[in-house]
Amino acid sequence: METRPLGETGQESSVLTFGAIALNFLEQDEADEMMQDVLDAGVNHVDVAPTYGDAELKLAPTLDDHREDIFLGCKTQERTYYGAWGELHRSLDRLGVDKIDLYQFHAVTSYDELRAITGEYSPEMAQGDHDPGALQAFVEAKEAGLIDHIGLTSHGDPALIRSAIDRMPELETVMFPYNYTLAGKEGPEYDYDAVLEKAHEEGLGTLCIKGFAKGPWPDDLPEDERPYDTWYEPFDDPADLEECLRFSLSNGMTTIPNAGDPKLVPAILEAAQNYEALDADAQDELREQGASGESPVPTTYIE
């Protein structure tokens, strides 16, 4: 599988990152088998989070056997100094490792969260004494050798993500939505191309979320009747999945995590192994096709 430099981290990441949330829906023996398939396909970058059920625990046996083969990304939704420290230690314990390669601020979607992370005073977030913020915890963890690199993930406003890059020079990667539906739409709320451009200017590695999103789930479809365990309705035809992957990677994303349902992983693995760039005309056709689709990303944010 093709690999690409993950910004200026020194890591060469496979063009597919394994989104380990898929392990949450499997028994341990099935999780072990899927991880072996993932590694055999050439994937070397794995992303997990404590909010992904027991995915950390189910990933641990593979990490024990193949730690040197895996660039491990993990995340926290804690925004305070002590909260971030606590969750980092919990993840290290659950994963059975002594270091996380890439630790990320997870799902940052508001300016209040950004102010809390950076330790700026915010009446809405502050309780009691001033908190130095999760960023300070990340910096100290890096100095202590518990993490190697610092990143951010967001499903939010492109302007917020660009602001986060400006405010946190410590960032080395950024994970954000990118697909041809978003790229085909007009308006600042869809302008993730501007995020991609800024990330490249700053030397950041870029990870593509919602790359396989077809749109939001229909309002009239009950959650327990959805055919896939994903937050959005995914494409599921192998040819469509391949187009999604090729579009995002052809536009300069470093790597793209798979859709979260394990049933979709084999086809996505195959598409990543067979990756070839789309030419400009094919990209334009997909943008035009996506312009009429419904965005899988919310367009209202709390500031």
Image (cartoon, helix red, strand yellow):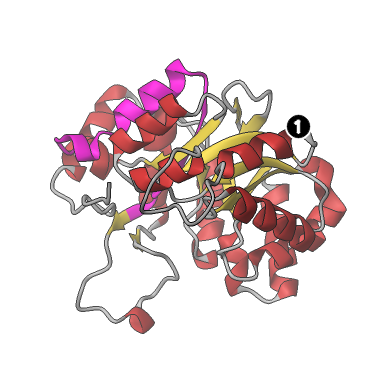
| Residue 194 belongs to the span the image colors magenta | yes
Seen at 28% across and 54% down, the residue is 296
- Relative height, residue 7 to residue 127 (above, below): above
Query: On the image, which quarter does residue 1 sit in?
Result: top right
Seen in the image, is 63 located left or right of residue 221? right
**Callout 1 amino acid:** Glu
Q: Is residue 273 visible?
A: no
Viewer-closest of 156 and 115: 115
Viewer-closest of 289 and 126: 126
Viewer-closest of 245 and 7: 7
Q: Position of residue 185 (x, y in %)?
A: 17, 39
Q: Is residue 260 visible?
A: yes
The residue at the far top in this view is 201
Which residues are the magenta region? 185-213
- Which residue position holds label 1? 143
Seen in the image, is 6 located left or right of residue 42? left
